Amino acid sequence: MSLRSDLGRVKGLGAAHEGVNHWRLQRLTAVALILLALWFVTTLMSLIGAPHEKVVAWVGQIHVTVLLLALSLALFWHLKLGLQVVIEDYVHTPWLLIAAQIAVRAFAALGALVAVVSILKISVGMS
């Protein structure tokens, strides 16, 4: 016997009415992170021992800037999604659950903001 309605089973909606969207987003960001991390590590390995000016010029290329921004945003979004699930599963005190969720979202937003500003600052040549 299931407590879910027929419509809920068809739509895949659980008690929070989010369905599988959270799961899909987490998998999507994971795939994006795999691809972007492979690009980042292989490219960065070619820059080992390069002078500072060459690395700054590399970051200044528009396609590199866009990929670095995508890597940073995917990383912090994936972090938020993953920690949200851990908190929901293991924190059972209501006020602590809310506080932890707010803290994770604030940390992820702040981390993403710092990453984006840093990448853009290097990209446009501001020291």
Image: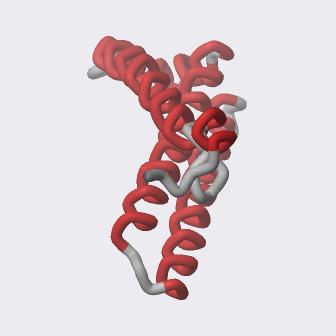
Q: Nearer the viewer, residue 90 or 123?
A: 90
Tell me which corner region of the image, top left, top right, bottom left or bottom right, holds residue 89: bottom left
* Coloring applied to the structure: secondary structure
Q: Which residue is most to the front? A: 1
Q: Position of residue 106 (x, y in %)?
A: 60, 66
Residue sitting nearer the eye, 58 or 88: 88
Please state the total of marks drawn on the protein image: 0
- Tell me if 52 is positioned left or right of 69 in this view: left
Question: Measured from the top left, where is residue 81 in percent x and y?
Answer: 50, 49
The residue located at (57%, 18%) in the rendering is 64
The answer to whether residue 127 is visible is no
**Residue drawn at (63%, 41%) of the image:** 6
Q: Is residue 91 visible?
A: yes
The x and y percentages for residue 90 are 34, 70
Q: Is residue 56 above or below residue 21?
A: above
Residue nearer the viewer, 88 or 112: 88
Instruction: Pick the quarter of the image with the C terminus.
Output: top right
Q: Position of residue 12 (x, y in %)?
A: 59, 38
Task: Name the residue at 66% across, 46% down.
Answer: 117
The answer to whether residue 78 is left or right of residue 126 is left
Going 42% across and 17% down the picture, which residue do you hit? Answer: 35
